[in-house]
Image: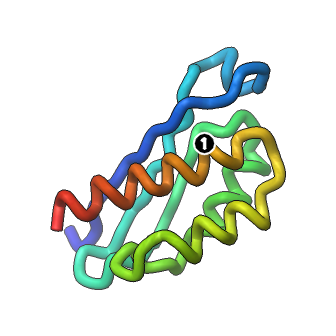
Amino acid sequence: MKTIFVAGHAKLPAGMAANHISESLTLTLEVDRKYGVIVDASCTLATEHGRSFVKALLKGYSLQDGVEEPAAELKTGYLGKAGNALEASLKDAHKQYLLHQ
């Protein structure tokens, strides 16, 4: 297999719809082994629209380049309550990726 599966987790803020299902947000990334490029992404946001938006936003970034740029995209592009949790889960996924390297 030419990809790896990386997961990151973060605590959700109180009062969110997704919080009724779980207190944490999970972000999963399918990453090209050789170049570290995110080829697919998923998260546990409550709406399909939100999940699709995050997926489209993250695809194409390389974890080998760090997560500053995709994190900035999340910060400016996603304006919901889960923004900080998304950023934290991305950083956690990046940490897991680096541990694998």
Q: Residue at x 52, y 80 (%)?
A: 60
Q: Residue at x 67, y 39 (%)?
A: 45
Q: Residue at x 55, y 35 (%)?
A: 25
Identify which residue, 45 or 90, lies in the foreground: 90
The residue furthest top is 20
The residue furthest right is 79
Could you tell me residue 58's position as x and y percent?
58, 68
**Neighbourhood count class around disc 1 (C-alpha, 10 Å): few under 14, some 14–19, many 20 upward:** some
Identify which residue, 20 or 90, lies in the foreground: 90
Residue type (three-letter) at the residue carrying disc 1: Ala
Q: Work out whether 82 lies above or below 50.
A: above
Could you tell me residue 46's position as x and y percent?
72, 34
Q: Is residue 79 left or right of residue 74?
A: right
Give the quarter of the image for residue 65.
bottom left
Q: Work out whether 98 lies above or below 66.
A: above
Q: Residue at x 72, y 61 (%)?
A: 75
Identify which residue, 92 or 43, lies in the foreground: 92
Could you tell me residue 28's position as x and y percent?
45, 50
Identify which residue, 10 or 55, lies in the foreground: 10
Q: Secondary structure at mark 1?
A: helix
Q: How many marks?
A: 1
Could you tell me residue 9's position as x and y percent?
45, 39
Which quadrant would the N terminus be assigned to in this image? bottom left
Q: Which residue is mark 1?
A: 85
